[in-house]
Image (cartoon, helix red, strand yellow):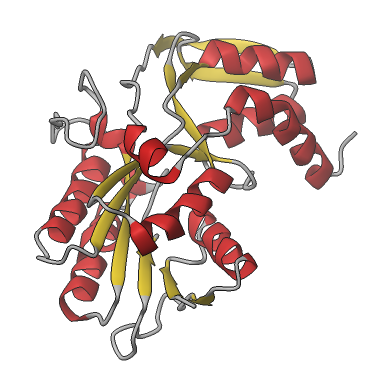
Amino acid sequence: MAAFTVLGGSGFIGSSLVRQLQSQRFSCWSPRRDENVLNRPLGHAIYCIGLTADFRGRPWDTARAHVVRLLEILEKGDFTSLLYLSTTRVYEGGESAGEEDPLYLHPSKPDALYNISKLMGESLCLSSGRADVRIARLSNVYGGDFSADSFLSYIVRDAVGQGKVILQSAMTSEKDYVHIDDVVRLLPQISLSGRHRLYNIASGVNTTNRALMEVIQRVTACAVEVADGAERAVFPTICIDRIRDEFGFVPLRILDGLGDMITEYRRRAGGP
């Protein structure tokens, strides 16, 4: 039985991955943040360390998480394979979003630090000279964690708790959402048998704010407002042909499960 190490196992994705691996009876080690990982074999390492919503206020920590810590493990770690979790945000500004498509980055943009640091991590992986070092670019992961400072968690919490949602982006804004269950099912497969160096993990379908809010309003009867000056944000549709062809991937659809997500939040919050 293969052995895994989940680096960053206390976060949303990492902790969900640990549970998935344990449910499949894999040997799984999730080291503490201050624990030495360079003095023992790591087996199949999955690098979930990273910052998300708070990266703008923590630039040094962002670089350490996405680049510096990774560099140490690539250079000195004893692993069978390593899978680095990156982001589909790197496709922002492009016309297409396939794994081999060109990327367009502007260092002065607000999100540039996050995207560029992730790409630096990717570049280190691809420059390592090891075919068993791979990258997974994840889209907007949802499901299970309502404490996360993500867009979906925010609108569900406000719809149920406040009875009102104020959107900071236009109703016509759209992006891809992928369920955490889909993510943690795919990651071990890529680690063990991935034939490529780079994979998109996404639903392959963009969903508009309007479509989300129609479901949320129907379930919660909340009010919805759009903030003054809200802009339209659109990302290119993410290509998932690689994971579909190689692993038979069929994604969950966010609009099909959003009502259940709201019901689960109400249950946890002790509401009706």
Residue at 14% across, 56% down: 126
Towards the viewer: 244 or 69: 244
Quadrant of res 105? top left
Residue 154, by quadrant, is top right
Q: Residue at x 53, y 44 (%)?
A: 182
Residue 81, relative to residue 63: is it above or below? below
Residue 205 placement (x, y as % from top left): 45, 22
Q: Where residue 101 sits in the image (x, y, percent)?
A: 16, 30
- At 45% from the left and 75% from the top, the residue drawn is 2
- Would you say 67 lies left or right of 266 here? left
Single out the residue that lies furthest toward the right.
272
Q: Residue 33's spot in the image, x, y percent?
A: 42, 75
| Residue 138 in view of the camera | no
Above or below — where is 47 with respect to 255? Answer: below
Whether residue 45 can be seen here: yes
Horizontal side of residue 79 vs 139, given as left or right = left
Disc tally is: 0
Q: Is residue 258 left or right of residue 102?
A: right
Q: Quadrant of the C terminus?
A: top right
Q: Position of residue 5 (x, y in %)?
A: 42, 74
Q: Image point 78% across, 19% down: which residue?
A: 219
From the viewer's perspective, is residue 217 above or below residue 256? above
